[in-house]
Structure formats: C-alpha cells, structure tokens
Image (cartoon, rainbow, N blue to C red):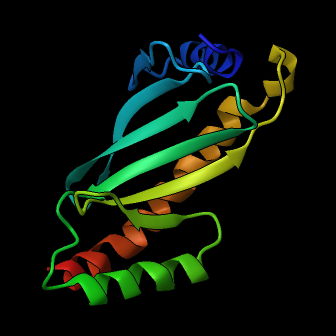
Amino acid sequence: MNTKAKVFSKYLKEKEIEVFQVEEIPEDEHNTVVFRSHIVVEGQQLPTLVILDDTAFSVIRVLILNNALTSENELKVLYMANTQNMNYKPFKLYFDRNGALLMDVCLTTPGQKEKDFSNLGDEIYGMLDLVIKFMGENYRTWMKEIW
C-alpha cells in the first residue's frame, strides 16, 4: 500500500469512518489504491472513488450517471458539461467511452513520507463536503438536460 493510502486508512480508522471498501490495484506502476464508497444525491447512490497513488496527485471521482451521453442528447449535454467546467474550477465533468457522466476533482498531494500527508484526510473530507454540496445544487438540472 502506498504512503498516501496508509495515511488515509489511518485517518479513517482514527475517525471511525467505515464507509470505504479498499482495493489495491495489482501490478500498478504507481501503486494505486482505490477507496470505494458512494454519496447520496436526490435519493440516488452515486459511486464515489478516492484514488491515491505515488504521484503528486490524488483524485476524487463520482459516477453521476451511466449512459448519460446518447446520440439524441450529445450536443446538449456536451455543452452542459463544458459550461460547468468553465464555471467551476475544482470540478471537471466528462464522459467515458460508454457515455457515462463522471466528475473528477484532482488534488495536489506531493510528498513521499507520512509527515508530508499529515492533513490528507481532512483535505479529502473537506473536498468531499464540497462535492456533496455541488452535486446537490446541480444534479437535478443535469438530469433535466440529459433526459
């Protein structure tokens, strides 16, 4: 397990947070560890990942909707995502190859030793709070655009 993941695991244990499933990605050159959970928005459970590795970055990823991009709504939802990306600096919406709508938040988390990540847990949870608020403010509008 990489150092950031160890520090975050320790944080979760100390705070008695038990909402994550942890998966170490085998044979990954960056020693990636994925913490899987979900957030609830408008009654929907949205899969949420915290991705920690040996690089100077960490990612929070939310799967907003599978099959969101279709041939019928393509122009409209691409415009919607692009507008959101221009207006909200930390949150980036995009579509995967299968048309799922995802949102990434990239955090800079440079360092190599545990002491370099002393605030990592609070930083991740602070950003998760912003993600939940942002999703709550925008989810319904996005779904109207998509459907």
Q: Quadrant of the C terminus?
A: bottom left
Looking at the image, which residue is at 45% across and 19% down?
Answer: 25
Query: Which of 7/24 is in front?
Result: 24
Looking at the image, which residue is at 86% across and 25% down?
Answer: 116
Looking at the image, which residue is at 24% across and 63% down?
Answer: 99
- 135 sits to left or right of 128: left
Query: Which of 9/2 is in front?
Result: 2
Q: Is residue 42 above or below residue 16?
A: below
Q: Is residue 37 above or below residue 3?
A: below
- 18 sits to left or right of 47: right
Q: Quadrant of residue 81?
A: bottom left
Looking at the image, which residue is at 86% across and 18% down?
Answer: 115
Q: Give the total number of marks visible in the rendering.
A: 0
Q: Position of residue 92 (x, y in %)?
A: 52, 65
Q: Quadrant of residue 55?
A: top right
Q: Quadrant of residue 47?
A: top left
Q: Position of residue 44 (x, y in %)?
A: 20, 54
- 116 sits to left or right of 25: right
Q: Is residue 27 above or below residue 140?
A: above
Q: Position of residue 14 (x, y in %)?
A: 61, 14
